Amino acid sequence: MLSKETILHKIQILITNHFETPEDAFAFFDKDGDGKLNKAEIVKLLKDAEITGFIRGMVSSKLIEGYDKDGDDLISWKEFKSAIDEITEESK
């Protein structure tokens, strides 16, 4: 299985190469426009970040588990930003 660092690095590459800002990336993947990413939306993000299909579902659950601070099984902009900040810190 890919390490957390590898997965976060692939997400960082996706956001850097395809979006002007993390906010643009969040809005792009928030298909229903509710201000939160659900599991299906996170799976799409992982697919676009070239995380293989075999582990995408497992990784999406772990991301939600790790970053969902309010316990609603969704990733809000604030929680997404926290993950992006972690990625940025690790790449310094």
Image (spheres, rainbow, N blue to C red):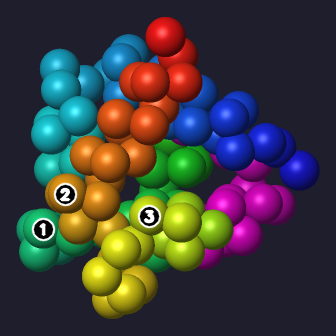
Label 3 residue SS: helix
User: Magenta span: helix, strand or loop, mainly?
Assistant: helix
**Any magenta on residue 58?**
yes
Three-letter code, disc 3: Tyr
Sequence-wise, the earlier of marks 1 and 2 is: 1
Label 3 to label 1, Cα distance in Å?
15 Å
In the visual, does 21 lie left or right of 74? left
Residue at 18%, 26% in the rendered image: 21
Instruction: Please give the range of residues in magenta.
Output: 49-61
Q: Residue at x 23, y 66 (%)?
A: 76
Disc 3 marks which residue? 67
Judged by depth in the image, the label closer to the viewer, 2 or 3, is 3
User: Which three-letter amino acid code belongs to the residue tagged 1?
Assistant: Gly
Q: CA distance from mark 2 to mark 3?
A: 11 Å
Image location of residue 32, percent across then percent down = 17, 72
Quadrant for residue 14, please give it.
Answer: top left
How many discs mark residues in the rendered view? 3
Whether residues under marks 1 and 2 lie with C-beta atoms below 8 angstroms apart, the answer is: yes
